[in-house]
Image (cartoon, grey):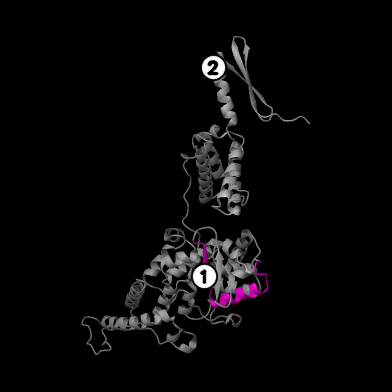
Amino acid sequence: MRRREPARVLGPYPQDQQWRIIQIDAKGRRKSHMADSRQAAKRLIAKLRTDMDARTVEDTLELWTAARLRSGGATPATVADQAARVRHLLAPVLDLRLNELTERKATAIYERATTEPSLKTGRPLSAASHRFYLSIVGYMWKWAQKQGYAKENPWAEVEPIGRVSSGKPQLRPAEARRFAQLAEQEAAAGSELALAALCCLSLGLRASEALGLTGRDIDAEANEVYVSGTKTAAARRRLKVPPYLGTLLGRAAATRHPMDRLCAAPRQTLHKAVVAMCARAGVPRVCVHGLRGTHASLAVSGGASVEAVARVLGHTSTKMTLDYYITEEAATDARVAAVDASLSLPNHSGANSDPNSPTVGSTSSSLLTLSDCREAASTLQVIATLPLPGRKAVNPSAGEAKADTIDPPALSLHKRAQETTSAQGCALWGEPNRSGGSTRPGWARSPGSAPLRRSVASMQLALVHLLISRRRT
């Protein structure tokens, strides 16, 4: 077999009062160039050899991928996935030199990507997907410019097409309760995928984090889980697990080697399982990331602070949490402190009669599963026990949280909040306070007024937050 020669430029050769230059590429293809003078021929040879030494798009992609793996800025799986996306987008121009790709060609490639059917779904890419492709390619070209491989970035002026939707579809509270009940039943029956889906909803985990949980990540005695996330600096975290989920995770970890995953399934399989579970539960279809967003929205609407929710989700800042995870409806509900009905559920079948289950029990015990922030959880529990005008007396035997079950740091806050809010409530409702004070004029007793009860709840929530802020300082 004949050995392949490297790309080269030959000449100049005199021919009919001109000078001929022969260019041979790496595949042995020949191309002739003509120059009017010997000096012009030498300049042309220098240019051709410079272009020949320039790297192709495919060579640059391989070098960029290797550089990202060495830097450790992303996981190998993420680097490989993004490299595959770039290769698919740039398939028509992989053999071109970097400087041969013009802005016009780049625009044509991007426009084709917005209409071409996806190999995965058979449908055109969403605006978020092809905009992401565009950003990755632009980032690679910036790297090539920094390395001196490219003079210009033809992707810098390419206009993105389409409008990106903010966040994934989420479940509403009643729908989330039905999904949680089904997931709990199937996880108790031994379904690994249902357990992973329940972790995404109850703990706000990413799909990769739920599927990456191993036996050693579960502390069944302390009801804690160690999340070894790698996406952001705050992804590695320790979360408090509600008892019902801790039991299921402990049972799954006990039957595996400490380094074995609790759910050995790929992300696409988990996505299909969540879609099927949505259909069985009779709720709208959501993806795995939609369950994570549902966790954030329910936590905020239940009274948890955005900062606490961001820490639970593993975000380094609250901007991502507010822009893509918390819905407008949840933000509105948080303003009126809708604590009483966020996750309180009626008792269901005896198969799930655990009082610690999210589908059974009081609101205060359910809200404590939404955040690992001690102050936020204590705040919610204090408010759930504060007396409101028109609220029926709580029967401790019915599963409601007693005063002595409140976390010790919240006991003093609880007493001070009760004393202060009781006095405020008496003044608001026109009732005598405990010290025998007189009724505030102009206010009539109307315990059935829902707007006024919400006003009192808002005052109580603001007061407890103020007490916690003073305690921190």
Q: Is residue 122 above or below residue 261?
A: above
Q: Residue at position x 70%, y 29% from top?
A: 5
Percent position of residue 261, x then y: 64, 66
57 and 215: which is toward the camera: 215
Query: Mark 1 or mark 2: which comes first in sequence?
Result: 2
> Which amino acid, by three-letter code, is at mark 1?
Leu
Percent position of residue 348, x then y: 56, 80
Q: Is residue 57 above or below residue 9?
A: below
Quadrant location, the C terminus? bottom left
> Which amino acid, by three-letter code, is at mark 2?
Ala
Q: Residue furthest top?
A: 17
Q: Is residue 384 above or below residue 65?
A: below
Q: Which residue is mark 1?
A: 239
Q: Which residues are magenta?
A: 234-259
Asked if the stretch drawn in magenta spans residue 241, the answer is yes
Q: Which residue is mark 2?
A: 40
Q: Secondary structure at mark 2?
A: helix
Is 317 on the left-hand or right-hand side of 207?
left
Q: Residue furthest left?
A: 441
